[in-house]
Amino acid sequence: MLLSTLVLFAYPLLAQGPYWGMTSSGGSFGVGTIYTITESNVFTTKHNFLRFDGSTPKGDVVKASNGLYYGVTEVGGTGGVGVLFSFNPSNGTYTVLHNFNSSTTGAQPLRGPVIANNGRLYGTCSSGGANNVGTLWEYNIGTSTLTKKFDFDGLTTGKGSTPRGRLMVHSNGTIYGTTQLGGLNGAGCIFSYTAGGVSNTKVYNFPALPAITTGNRPLTGLAQSGSLLYGFTANGGANGHGSIFSFNTSGNVFTNLYNFLATGAGRAPLSEFTAVSGVLYATASAGGSSSGGTIFSWDISGAAHADLVHLNNSIGYAPFSRLFAASDGQLYGTTSAGGTSNAGVLFSFNTGTNTYTPVLQMASLGLSAPWSSVIEDPSGTLVGMASDGGTGNEGALFKYTISGSVGTVLLPFSYANGANPHGRLFKASNGLFYGLASAGGEFSSGTLFSIDPTNSNFITRVHFDNGKGTIPLGSLVEDNGKLYGVCSAGGTANGGTLFEYNISSNILSVKVNFASTLVGNAPVNGLFKATNGLMYGATGAGAGNAQGSLYEYVPGGTTLTKRKDFLLATTGKQPLGDVMQASDGLLYGTTSLGGAENYGTIFSFDPVSNTFTTIYNFNGLEGGTPGGELLQATNGKLYGVFREEGQGFSGGIYSWDIGTATYTEEFDLNIAPVTDQGSLPQSSLLQGSDGMLYGTTTQGGSGGNASGAIFRFDPTSLAYSVLLTFTGASNGALPYDGLVPESAVIPQSVGLAAKVFLEGPFVSGTGLMNANLRSLPSFPLTEPFSALGFTQVGGGGETIAPSVLATSGNNAVVDWVLVELRNAATPATLVRTQAALLQSDGDIVGLDNNSTLTLPVPAGTYHVAIRHRNHLGVMTGTAVALSSSPTSLDLTTGLVGTYGTNALKTVGAYRVLRTGNSFRNTNIKYTGSQNDRDPILIRVGSITPNNTANGYFQEDVNLNGQVKYTGSANDRDPILLNVGSIAPNNTVTEQLP
């Protein structure tokens, strides 16, 4: 039996295709792909990683003299509080220049930067910094350096606090701005700042409330016309709704010019004036005849205010942007809402005729909620940003061509699912592939994700941060239902972490924080599980020689044991691949640097005697800088790749015979005159069902855009061929590690063909539910239940492609539902949860809106519960037998018994889940504490309960995309009807154990 075990270990069954791999760059968004390829050379892109740096931009972009656009996002980045970025319009290159930090450079920059006379960018953060009330910063384009110039402080004698308006550069070169709070009276101030300085000067302090004569707490910046600056206050004034003022910088003279009215006229401007021929133009975000805001003017010479356009839902409303004077003589601006799908519009305004025209519906680009103004570049093309929507659902940079009336998305923002993967995928015991992305994610620190090989459903499982670790590298390994891997940085000592991920509970735990002492830090590859049950890995720095070490780990433990200190001159250092175990029981690995010839080494390690031996020193001529995990082929030899040197100076393939201790340079890439075989390989190799070896090169291939290749090598005939060349956007670039077979594990799963109706959107006359929510720009592409506090077991983070929302008719997506499998004997115990899509005809389907829902659990009997975010859930009264063949479960007819009493509501001939749980708990209440009526009132505005709120909201209990407190189709009445309109103090309780 022992011999059989060794033989199976040494010579596993040949891999069965297709083979899965990843690129760290390229693809649709330039940050990597997941792909498959077959031995017959059929290539398929399975997933494009999204672009993740920064999200929710609300300020304008500016164009610098180098031709680049510069802007900020309010959130995202490594600190989650925004980034400064550049965008090259000529080639589409997006670069994060600075990740804002709450404690140092500031947080949440709301308005875009300005370019001062010294050519540098200046901007503010609305919070963060030393006093957590904002900062003013400078960015030197020439040196690519961002410097905080000073912290706002909120002291009466200090610099002001909470700047929310845009800075402006005066014609004399001085920078002026406002703060909402702080200053002498705590009600904000106007300040001046000399570019390059380390402090500001308060030139005017707004009075404290009630500030009847002047107003206070400005939310906007200033604009210059002639010798005066003009601005707005958000509070106070004669009518309590703020005012228009002028400010003379020569004598610091403040003059209140106009008080906004309480009704009828526009009020609450959230952007600055634009001057045209002695008249100032701006937008008001509220008020007006339709309460949607206005476009208004201030005639400087006549001291007259006029509302010129009253905005409403159909043409766009709630404008937050400055107006921009374009070369065609029109003013352009955006509304944050209204228009198609309530997504906002880009509009033009003719100052001669006061004609307002929506020229671009944001919904047509899949965008919504634009806050920013636009710039013109080149002439006739406007460029702006939307704060929501886009493929990443976090906003986008867009352009609009005036002559052709054509809008185009230039750059989608997001932090959704990771970027730049460097390792291999790992197929776990549940049949899913798991992997690590080294960048991206909510905190721009990488993610752990899964992808289902049966339907390519991609789910982000973990967003790494400094506590969990950052920049995860290498691949994962499984032990007892848990995955183990490493991050190369972050953790308590910023030296990286070793983590454990529980597949069933979806919980990640840090088991070890790497430090420079003991085993070292900065792990450079993943873990390998040996036949003794222990795991082995390597660090790249620290430990005894400050050059890293080989270490041992007991799965589930919290300590590491150092087995060997690396030393450049003898053992080599910086292994680029995991170790592996050969048929002789020894572990084998490589180092990429050092050794006797300084080109790296091959080493062995005996896990019984803990003996480390350097068995070969690369010499450059026969290859150097080995990378990737070694493979033991069916001929008994170990095969690997070297990244550099060799006869073609492009890397190659080598073998090591463990029986004779013989090194053989098997194949050199690109020996002249050949140039198209790929170069710089550092991948692991895989032996296919045809006996050939398969791998990747990080660069080269055929064609002018070659960015890496997939190759095949015959270890018998030494024939080498390129199967595919990566070219960037079309199929990916830079495949760092190799391929893995799809056939490693056969997953266990059960199928469920369930059907339910939700009361809110249900129409009894048609037996269908309306699907209004799917057209909302804010419809979540990631399941909403985790954020709402629903307990998850194995599920959570399920994500859909935007394209599934385009389906109409009976199969249109109504909303997300949460499917729970519960223990047959103790139904209060969750076994598995999984988010799924609910269609208009009641069918619950998979994340592609087509396939039958499958859950990765063994066949057996389970209580099945269906839950929704604002409807009461339901569970089967008895356990249901589930198997790999889909089990039908129709909860709409009343024929299936349910747990508890009256768990479902009868509507005509149908049974439906009760609506009205807007305060997320387990009951529906109309009065008393934690009732479901008050959240609706709060959402629409408790002072004006006849308002509406459009979007994907918990309080929208009829799921029509609009929250209403009064009037037809309001969301309050269904709650009252469900508790009993005669006795509104009743409570309806969810019938779940």
Image (cartoon, rainbow, N blue to C red):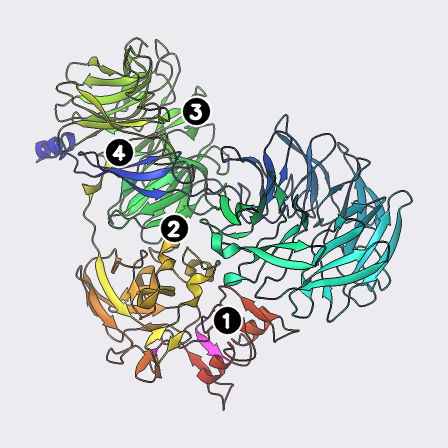
Whether tag 4 and tag 3 are in contact, CB under 8 A, the answer is: no
Residue position for label 4: 739
Spatial CA distance of label 2 from label 4 is 27 Å
Quick check: is 927 in the magenta stretch?
yes
Quick check: is 931 in the magenta stretch?
no
811 relative position to 63: left or right = left
Q: Earlier in the sequence, mark 2 or mark 1?
A: 2
233 relative position to 874: left or right = right
Tell us which disc is closer to us: 3 or 1.
Answer: 1
Instruction: From the top left corner, tell me how far across and down residue 409 is, in percent.
Output: 49, 46
Q: Earlier in the sequence, mark 3 or mark 2?
A: 2
Magenta segment boundaries in residue numbering: 912-928
Whether tag 3 and tag 1 are in contact, CB under 8 A, the answer is: no
**Where 91 falls versus 661 (above or below)?**
below
Q: Secondary structure at mark 3?
A: loop
Spatial CA distance of label 2 from label 1 is 27 Å
Residue position for label 1: 919
198 relative position to 6: left or right = right
Whether tag 2 and tag 1 are in contact, CB under 8 A, the answer is: no
525 relative position to 885: left or right = right
Spatial CA distance of label 3 from label 1 is 54 Å
> In which quadrant of the rendered image does the C terminus lie?
bottom left
Q: Secondary structure at mark 4?
A: loop
Residue position for label 2: 507
**Where 795 falls versus 582 (above or below)?**
below
Q: Earlier in the sequence, mark 2 or mark 4?
A: 2
Mark 4 Cα shell of 10 Å, populated few (<14), some (14-19), many (≥20)? many
Tell me the number on the disc at residue 543: 3
Spatial CA distance of label 3 from label 2 is 30 Å
